[in-house]
Amino acid sequence: MLKTALEGKIKLKDIQVEVLSCRPIQGNGIVVKIKTPEMLEKLKTTIMNDLTLRDKCQVYIPKPRVPHIIIFDIPPQDEDEAAHENNFILQLKDSNELTDQEIKVVFKKKGRGSLQNWILAMQPKNYQEIKNKKRLCCGFNSYCFKEFLEPLRCFGCYRFGHLKRNCRETKPTCTKCTANHDPKGCTKPHPICRNCVLYNKSTNLKVRADHMSNSNLCPMYLREIEFIAKHTIYGSVPPIVFSLCVLQANLGRSRMATQELPNICFSNKIPDVFLLQEEYLKKGKVIGFPLNWKIVAALNGKAIIRNKNLSILTRYVSQNTVIADISDGTQTIPVVSVYIPHSSNKNSEILKLEDIFRNINFSHILIGRDFNMRHELWGPEIHNHRIFDQAAPLVSFILKYDLIIWNGKDSEPTFETVNGKSWIDITMFSANLANKKMNWQVIENTFSDHNYLVFNVESFNATRDPPRIFFNYRQILKICKAVHQKFLELQEEIQTIDRKQKLEKWIEELTNTINQISQSFPIKVIKHLRVPWWDSELEDEEAWNFANQRGVPQGSCSGPLFWNLVMYTAPTTGKSHPSLCRRHNCCNQRRIYYGAIEPYLLFGVGAWGNRLKLKKIRYSLNSLQRRPLIKITKAYRTISREALQVIAGVVPLDIKAKGVFGKFLLTTINNDIKLGSKIFKWEDYETKLDPHNIHPADNISITYDKHKPSGEEIEIYTDGSNFNDQVGAAIVVFYYNAEIFNTTIRLSDFATVYQAEVTGIQMALELISTIEPWNKSNLYTDSLSVLEALNTFKTSKQDILAIKNDILEMSKEKSITLHWIPAHTGIQRNETADSYAKKATTRPNIEKIPKKSFKQLKNAISNVQIQIWFRPGFFSACQFLLEFRADQVCGSMKPRHLNCLAHFGDPPDGSIDVRESVYLYIYKETIVREHLTGPQHYPDNGLVSGTRGEVSRNQEEEVCHGLVVTKVAIKSSELS
């Protein structure tokens, strides 16, 4: 034995080494735990210097455990296992941008079905990069993962530290008690954990053991996990540098600049303190700031604290100066916000500031000022000695109090307008704060004529409290169980606590348990829309308008339903006037279904639409659809679902949900979809602009007039045409009534006339860009829809927004006027443009392929939904339903409705019965007519000739009646 050999050769007392423990491991080795690292080195040197021991054993220090993760549900591959592991790790590094450090597969476990769970060991740096992610990307796949802290456990005796194949016990141990028998035959009424019982015997504690040995809430199991996590190296955490973010700004009395401050953010950093001058006032009061901000206000200057973890103490307030102490609880920095008006006497203002500094003692100070003075110390070189001499009092003040200026000489101007720019806003501080400067910069493009100054003060703890986390009942119950188990484990230690350190350690262990359980729960993040122009005033007005316009009193339990359903009195008119409103009542109910009930049932389909492949979800949707369809058709409740949908003429709700979900993926997520057998590519369709991404100040309107053409200057006429299912656009240019230029273009055949009219205006703007700027251009079009789209401020179409921007840009140098003229009213020049547009449709080549409109997308999806509904084999079932089971359909209708159907229409031969009228009603009033019209669906009885478009309504009724008669005759012959 190795241990015996070591004891025979080495005397621990002679080398002054103290061994804490020694235990055997696999491979005939031993693990020796030494008290100190110095003793470890002595023992290692002694063994290596002995020739006999050096030949028998190798001495090494075990490597610390690196973080392990478990990746779930990885599909197996047919390729070589080692090659598969290498390819997977390479894809994992590339997809998650991990550093090139070692990642290896430790072992694999069986997952769901044929899938596998892989346990990977990685370096601490890689683990720190992925630990906050929910899923790991790997090529085109993504996998769930979590940290792997599973202890080594034997599932034979359920002890820790070895596997079942190395277990010394020959008989299995019951998980419910401590006996050696099969767990299925255990007769114990209550479980007893073997590990906890043995721990209580060895430590004389009373850890609760009323649970099974394989329970994941076992205190011994949690203790093993805690031990593994404690001995895992997660890497050194870089020191956190706290900083105080300060915004210095002269708002120039701008209301937009003042109301922008609550939503302002620079490089993901929210300002903690604002030093403001000349903010917007209304009736002498500042508006737009939240009520929980701490404000020290003067007439022309303010110091505002946004971070609630900071405290403020007012030191001095005058008309143009505010001095306050800002503290984080450990240190304090006095800040000064000063404004010196441009028309004031600079010498007297500086003298007043010196009096303030003389009366208030400061060891260090931070000053943000708008001095309205220029100098080379905080701006570029000045050649005007008058301006230089004007700033002399301020320079003397800076030298007297040993202040340092943070402004850079090469920085951007702090004041900038169309008339000029200047460097008049200054940030300065005392000399003992020189090492705390961080990231001083000038922020341009603000709502004020002054640019903002943003800087950080280092080593100032201005961290914000984390958001408050709310737990549901299930999570609170889980926390309570874990705390209860931990408290039972630690309650014996309370009796032995006699020092403050022991008590703090006891509290720390209990707190760590609570934090560990709490952090395992997913955090629900609610994303609020934040735009710069939204403030508390608009928030109050929105709440007031919502409460007054929603139409339902507060506290009404029917409120949420009526917010989604549009109810009106039209459905009740049929009861008073049955002869007039017989058909309109059904149409009104159908309108309510399409406008309110169906959107209500499909609300949020973008979130749960991927579950439509489940049969249970589809069945639930059709069950919810059944009740409103019964109200529409006035049928009995025993009618079958397919018959009800056909009679009502409503697409099944599960098919409708697939179409709505596909539309969401195509237009919002920008993903290609496959609906039925047709593939829709999102690049082929127009994408709507999000109005929230456009600032209201950027919304412009291009006006037009309705003046008749005058024949003066340049007149450009545009037109679009759809002729013989071919689309074209053209422009014609007249100069004092003489045609001087024309051009045409052919669009793809699926383009709309609206798109052709837009293309015509785009062609005209391209031509105007080449015309000399002194010429006035008049653009005439007969498309009122395009002009109205340009006239509205908000738009969701990219082509219209591009035209607006082009007109706005060219209007800076040229004169462009839009005019509307009526079409086909004898205006010869417009008729000329129309003739050119029709000629463009005959061009051999298509020169422009616009994107399909949103309406075309809806129509295409509707057509595919109809095709899915009337799938192959459904026509035969539908005909069987409508023809051979007419008795069942009639039996499902109430008698008074059958009387209405009996007079719905008269067949050609004058004979009428209820059954034929039911079929005639279904044929006329539902979408079944769209698919059953045409000679291919009817027997050759001589009633049908030509294509579907050539069949008149009378012929359709004759075909319908003939089909009924023919099928009834066939059925009668079969019965006989």
Image (spheres, rainbow, N blue to C red):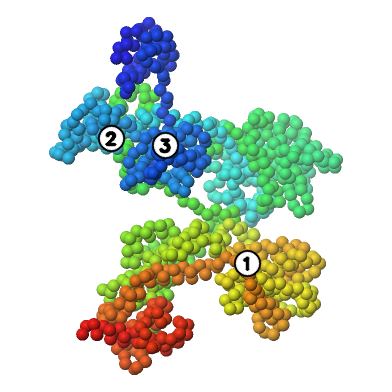
**For the residue marked with disc 3, what is the amino acid?**
Ala
Disc 1 versus disc 3: nearer the observer: 3
As drawn, the label of residue 848 is 1
The quarter of the rendered structure image containing the N terminus is: top left
Using the image, determine if residue 602 lies above or below residue 478.
below
Which picture quadrant has residue 500? top left
The residue singled out by tag 2 in the image is 218
CB contact under 8 Å: marks 1 and 2 = no
Q: Which of the two discs, 1 and 3, labels the residue nearer the N terminus?
A: 3
**Local crowd size for mark 1, using a 10 Å CA cut-off: few (<14), some (14–19), many (≥20):** few
Mark 3, secondary structure of its residue: helix
The quarter of the rendered structure image containing the C terminus is: bottom left
Q: Nearer the viewer, residue 149 or 289?
A: 149
537 vs 186, left or right, is right
The residue singled out by tag 3 in the image is 82
Q: Position of residue 246 (x, y in %)?
A: 62, 41
Q: Position of residue 6 (x, y in %)?
A: 34, 11
Mark 2, secondary structure of its residue: loop
Q: Which of the two discs, 1 and 2, labels the residue nearer the N terminus?
A: 2
What whole-number distance in Å separates the C-alpha atoms at marks 1 and 2?
Answer: 71 Å
Q: Nearer the viewer, residue 13 or 300?
A: 13
Using the image, determine if residue 382 lies above or below residue 446.
above
**For the residue marked with disc 1, what is the amino acid?**
Lys
